[in-house]
Image: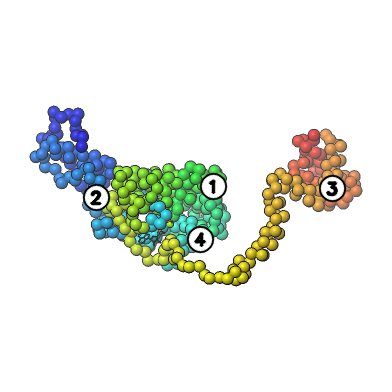
């Protein structure tokens, strides 16, 4: 190891200069890189001054830096790899939020479920459920189950405000919405949560599973740019402005690289689980302060439910832990492996009813051809098919002859020998396509061909 104090070897730090080493409680609060520097410095001081009376300083080159003494915890999370209890401090959690990250199957949804169960009844909870996985939570604990697809964005905004006002715990089930609909819904709902009046700024945990769906990094979403932007903006707002308003996000995502940077940067506490991709392991290593080799050794072999906890809200940090059990049924498990039913060909044909599907497909052909038309062509067809089209054509021809003058609408039926109703319907059709200009009122109301149509 290189001495840190090479700059001034002739003036070794001695006890006489008043070396003060912070107590372990203080060290435990430092970030990992700062803590390691402090240990390096202490080792340096000890080497230069063997007689100095320093607390028992661990070897700074060990990758397993010891954790500080346990802090208070009021949420029971699970057990560390050494069998100690590990928990979260609710107040610190509200201040610093939590991000749960890990590959598919790492145990993120389970962990959210555990946190929901452990904090239930102590603070308002809002659960954003993109896959419809958390219904058993509302069945057991009585969270109000909201099917987001039944509400438009305006209604979701009102709902958000009411949820804040009345401190009602809700489960927002988004499983029936398409991706774009989910983004629109989250933008409206979160915006209302954050913008609730000061009188409604109560503490509230907002659990968001698959958070990258709502705040995708860069272009990683098929949604239109404006929809994506407003959803990301709403999630960032929840994470940043939300804190003073009592809103604390507990987010889960598969990949840090898929989550908008501005969201990840608002998080102070991390639970990092199994990761298998190189890029993810490197990002995770940076997040939890592990060196890359340790991360490559350990992160891919973590079991489902094993996480590395880092952050001020954990009672021990950093620590490797197994998240404890859950009371409600967890749907995330893959279905059991069962052999397929034995079905003979004729029963299969009956069950699949392929013939009627082929017929339906043929019947749909006409419709599909229609839909495949370019929008302009579809418009022209709609125009031509309108019953008023023939009269409209004649009116257009007459008016073109009169151009740049026009005609009184009241005179059209007589001039064309059609009923006033037919003439009016034809004028309305032409107007619908922006072909006419109007002037005057009542019986003198006149019409001529719109400027851009005169050539
Ligand atoms: N703490 C745990 N204790 C015991 N089993 C667990 C634990 N966490 C996860 N598991 C097991 O792992 C499975 C997958 O967990 P989970 O559904 O939470 O994964 P996930 O990270 O949310 O995956 P995905 O990203 O695909 O949604 C669970 O169904 C469960 O069987
Ligand atoms: Mg999950």
Q: Earlier in the sequence, mark 2 or mark 3?
A: 2
Q: Which mark is residue 222?
A: 1
Which sits in the foreground, 389 or 374? 374
Residue at position x 41%, y 47% in the image: 256
Q: Which residue is mark 4?
A: 146
Which sits in the foreground, 292 or 448? 292
Give the x, y percent position of residue 414.
Answer: 90, 47
Ligand 2: give its quadrant.
bottom left
For the residue carrying disc 1, how many other residues have a C-alpha within 10 Å: few (<14), some (14-19), or many (20+)? few
Give the x, y percent position of residue 436.
Answer: 78, 41
Q: Which mark is residue 67?
A: 2
Q: CA distance from mark 3 to mark 4?
A: 52 Å
Give the x, y percent position of residue 219.
Answer: 50, 43
Q: CA distance from mark 4 to mark 2?
A: 42 Å
Q: Earlier in the sequence, mark 2 or mark 1?
A: 2
Give the x, y percent position of residue 420.
Answer: 85, 50
Q: Earlier in the sequence, mark 1 or mark 3?
A: 1
Q: Nearer the viewer, mark 1 or mark 4?
A: 1
Residue at position x 47%, y 46% in the image: 216
Q: CA distance from mark 2 to mark 3?
A: 86 Å
Q: Nearer the viewer, mark 2 or mark 1?
A: 1
Q: Which residue is mark 3?
A: 391
Q: Which mark is residue 22?
A: none
Q: Secondary structure at mark 4?
A: strand
The scheme the figure's colours follow is rainbow
User: Is residue 125 placed above or below 140 in the rendered structure?
Assistant: above
Is residue 188 visible in the rendered image? The answer is no
């Amino acid at each position: 190891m290189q001495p840190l104090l090479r700059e001034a070897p002739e003036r070794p730090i001695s006890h006489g200069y008043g070396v003060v080493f912070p107590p372990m409680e203080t060290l435990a609060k430092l970030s990992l890189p700062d803590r390691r520097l402090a240990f390096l410095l202490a080792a340096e001081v000890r080497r230069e001054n063997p007689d100095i009376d320093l607390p028992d300083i661990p070897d700074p080159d060990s990758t397993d830096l010891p954790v500080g003494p346990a802090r208070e915890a009021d949420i029971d999370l699970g057990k560390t790899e050494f069998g100690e209890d590990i928990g979260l401090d609710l107040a610190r959690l509200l201040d610093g939020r939590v991000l749960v990250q890990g590959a598919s199957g790492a145990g993120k949804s389970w962990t959210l479920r555990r946190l929901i169960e452990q904090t239930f009844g102590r603070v308002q909870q809002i659960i954003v459920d993109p896959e419809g996985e958390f219904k058993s939570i509302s069945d057991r604990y009585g969270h109000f189950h909201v099917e987001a697809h039944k509400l438009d964005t305006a209604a979701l905004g009102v709902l958000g405000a009411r949820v804040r006002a009345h401190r009602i715990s809700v489960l927002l089930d988004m499983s029936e919405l398409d991706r774009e609909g989910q983004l629109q819904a989250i933008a409206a709902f979160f915006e209302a949560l954050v913008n609730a009046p000061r009188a409604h700024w109560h503490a509230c945990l907002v659990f968001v599973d698959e958070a990258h769906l709502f705040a995708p990094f860069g272009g990683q979403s098929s949604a239109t740019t404006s929809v994506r932007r407003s959803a990301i903006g709403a999630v960032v707002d929840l994470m940043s402005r939300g804190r003073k308003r009592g809103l604390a996000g507990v987010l889960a995502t598969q990949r840090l690289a898929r989550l908008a940077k501005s969201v990840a940067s608002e998080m102070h506490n991390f639970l990092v689980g199994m990761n298998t991709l190189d890029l993810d392991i490197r990002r995770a290593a940076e997040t939890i302060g592990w060196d890359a080799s340790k991360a490559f050794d350990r992160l891919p072999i973590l079991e489902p439910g094993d996480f590395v906890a880092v952050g001020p809200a954990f009672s021990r940090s950093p620590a490797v832990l197994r998240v404890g059990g859950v009371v409600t049924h967890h749907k995330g498990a893959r279905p059991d492996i069962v052999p397929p039913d034995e079905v003979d060909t004729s029963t299969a044909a009956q069950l699949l009813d392929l013939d009627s599907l082929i017929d339906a497909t043929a019947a749909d052909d006409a419709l599909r051809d229609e839909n495949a038309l370019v929008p302009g062509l579809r418009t022209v067809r709609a125009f031509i098919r309108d019953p008023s089209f023939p009269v409209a054509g004649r009116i257009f021809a007459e008016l073109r002859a009169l151009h740049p003058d026009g005609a009184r609408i009241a005179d059209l039926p007589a001039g064309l020998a059609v009923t006033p109703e037919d003439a009016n319907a034809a004028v309305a059709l032409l107007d619908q396509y922006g072909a006419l200009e109007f002037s005057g009122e009542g019986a003198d109301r006149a019409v001529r061909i719109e400027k851009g149509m005169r050539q």
